[in-house]
Amino acid sequence: MMRLKYRQAVYQHSDKVNEPLLVELDQRSRLPPTVPDGLGGGVDVPAHLARVCSPRLPAISELSVVRHYVRLSQMNFGVDNGSYPLGSCTMKYNPKIDDVVAGLHGFSMLHPAQDELSVQGALRVIWELQLFLIELTGMDAITLQPAAGSQGEFVGMLVTKAYFKESGELDKRRKVLIPETAHGSNFASAAMAGFEVVPVPMRDGEVDMASFRALCDDRVAAFMATVPNTLGLFEQRILEISDAVHACGGLMYFDGANMNALIGVVKPAQLGFDIAHLNLHKTFSTPHGGGGPGAGPVAVKKHLADYLPLPRLRKSEDGSYTWDYASRRSIGRVREGFGNFGVLLRAYTYIRTLGLEGLRQAARDSVLVSNYAAKRLSQVYSLPFGGKPRKHEFVISSKPTGKRAFDIAKHILKWGYAPTIYFPQLVDEALMIEFTESETKREVDEYIQGLLDAAKSDLTSDPNNTSVDRLDEVRAAREPKLTWRDLGCVEP
Amino acid sequence: MPEPEADSFSHPYLGLTPDDREEMLRELGISSVDELFSDIPVKSEFHGLPEPASEAEVYRELFNLSLENSNCMEHPCFLGGYHIHYVPAVVQKIAERSEFLTSYTPYQPEISQGLLQALFEYQSLMAELTALDVVNASHYTYGTSLGEAAHMAHRVTGRRKIVVCGAVNPERLEVLKTYAFGRDLSVVECGHDGESGEANLEEALSELDSDTAMVYAESPNYFGVIEPRLGELAEEAHRRGSLFCQGFDTISLAIFRPPGEVGADIAVGEGVGAYPSYGGPTLGVFAVRREYVRSMPGRVVGATVDRSGRRGFVITLQTREQHIRKEKATSNITTNSAILALQSAVYIALMGYEGLKRLALTVLSNTKYTQRRISEVKGVVSPRFKGFSYQDFVVEGKINASVFKQSLRSRGVLGPTQINYMGGSGWLVGVNELITPKHVDLLVECLKESVEV
């Protein structure tokens, strides 16, 4: 088999420093770029309002700036460099047409305070995307405002809070049940909304029904689940769970970060969920940008629609769109503007190019490839809760190999592979792998071979093909150096 | 249309061919992908979703749709509240680099040094501009940074009251209130001086008490007025054991007193170097004094060394974060605005201190010029608030709103917008370095047509 070897760019400035920091590139006497002259001539800033200490910002020529960042880009790795099967993150191909559309000036240069009449084209995209996502989740109403999945969770929890506040039950309903197999953000989001978080233990990788039943009572505000869960398993008794939660008067929350397994296959509403968020930067392929931006729309059933953030988009009889700011019950805004429109545009373009058929095939392929790789890797690694089909991702443990997941992760960087490790914390020495539908069989086979080889290799000197060697993360946390001033690069 | 044969669908975005799928099924010893979904109790039907379409068709349609919008580069724009500046071509080109754009959160730092260093530099540049010690690697927006600041102040002080002083952007205020609802905090609003538009300090001070977690003010405020007495406010807040948080405009920090110089504990603001894209994505800056670093929400990048002693960068202080600390985390934030942090850094690197200063002075000059020109219109007061203003200002007069809006629309002018405030209503005008005398002429004409004498 052909095997790609990867060696990352190194621009070595000295023994101790690769590419210098901007402040080390300072060309002090350089004049700044030209900006337009003021129309009103010079204006003095009154002394009591004026800045006293000068900030230490470098002055650098344009080419030097360009080179600095091009070099830094070559010291980085993205989906466009190679396969990136980072579990839980859905690093699929980000189609270039989506970026081109988002960059059209008729979209990118719209001011959020513009009159609705001047942005009808943009509003139509938002409207249609809302309809698509409502259909895919099976819900009745949606907000595209949340800027990321976590913010979507926060919105869902605030909607829950407002709903029970209105019904007069909030004092009683303080608990949010969250399976141990959920994302960490679920716990944090419920806490941010002021709820008491109650973890639900698992059994065989799914919710332990006996524990769940013991916890499910009329003090429950919501059951918040990541589906499929962080082990890549579908909760097979989800209908039973949602019936029980509803019987207690609670709401069902669907964390859709893992929706890539289910898109076009099943609607969360039909699994009994009342609220669902989606991660457009995962399932709908918008680029992660090194950590953001994302978009985390929240869809809800009819009885919760009035609680969604404002404003909400309305379509008039004449076909025009307007923002509606009137709802007594809304939780209010969760950000300025109307959502991460640039991200929404990309997701809309993605849905239009793939269509329902393509979305469904993507889900099926992501699941197929995940089961295929899990099976092959289970010859050497252990696959907890074997025998159950995986969904779009799977978790293996390196324990049988006698190697630490950490060392394996550093070793396989030599092919550019960066897996998620030690998550979920439920599995010892966990490696969490998610190929997505984008990779070819050859890429998948190469990755599998890499992991199989790693189990037999000496890993102690890895990585040695990246722009730096293994980094001391403990030292970074012990004496935090968070700016170039902390590093002593500028005089105090 | 008959259902297509299962798993025969091919598309440029999909890696597997029908043959690959067959081979994988054989390895798994099953005959259909359906078997992998046998654990799902429901199979849904979908209606109203699009058919697959070619890139060419979709592009043409969306290109034409984009032309139905009036954009703020083509049209004179006097919208305030959210600030647009020219984005140098370098910034756009660097942000498009695939190695950055298609990368994930750098959890494996050795292979992600480029982005980590860029974020470290962003933190350093913003720390210089705000004159504070620590800046995190970004939040979603200015307003969500503010919401997180309130949660942080509650965490640090154990108190529940947030005092908002003076004219604060109403959208941001709403975001603050939404976040406050989450942690059951109360938000108390204190007004502005009717003449100057500056925060009414006496009113704010009377609200400070032993349950006050945080005092917040913006400068420039919603009326564009630079708040002159933030130092006093910060001092009084500290005297009562509360934190002081200042909202700021990034570019204006080159000429006005930054949060660190007035004694702020937290500062929140907006990024630079990106076009507005109808309001998002954007970036929320979050800066704090060093003593609060471990209570700070959000991701942060720190410097360290590798095995051979070479400088390198990692995400650090992660035990504050949700994937480790769960419900005890300092925030639920995961995805942030990393690529916009990179854009902000490239922008500031290109401009340098001198460049930012010149730009801020141009905006200031254009503010005064536009104010003066509008004040020549009979029946219009410009600026309505007499405090020293920058970028935004309010005009008031007997302006017929519908005539004015129609007049602006017919001349292709975007904004200003009508706003209400204590004791009246007016129009919020925003300027930047892109306006020309011709643009201002148009605005003045529109006003003249709309004033009721």
Image (cartoon, rainbow, N blue to C red):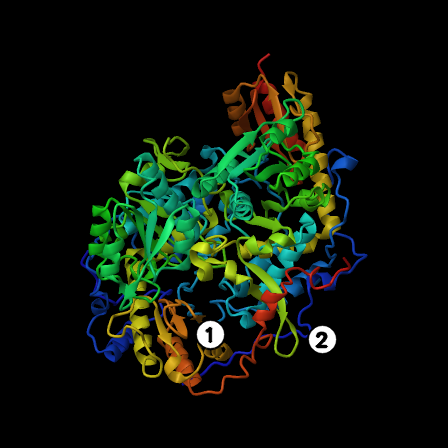
Q: Where is residue A456 in the image (x, y as percent from the top left)?
A: 43, 87
Q: Quadrant of residue A263?
A: bottom left
Q: In which quarter of the image is the N terminus of chain B?
A: bottom left
Q: Which residue lies furthest to the top in this view?
A: B453
| Chain letter, disc 1 residue | A
**Residue type at numbered disc 2:** Ser
Query: Could you say which disc has been placed on residue A417 in the image?
Result: 1
Residue B323 or B82: which is nearer the viewer? B323
Residue found at x 69% / y 74%: A16
Side of A275 where A469 appears, left or right: right
Q: Mark 2 points at which residue?
A: A14
Q: Quadrant of the C terminus of chain B?
A: top right
Residue B165 or A116: which is nearer the viewer? B165
Q: Where is residue A27 in the image (x, y as percent from the top left)?
A: 78, 60
Q: Residue furthest right?
A: A29
Query: Could you say which disc has been placed on residue A19 in the image?
Result: none
Q: In which quarter of the image is residue A375?
A: bottom left
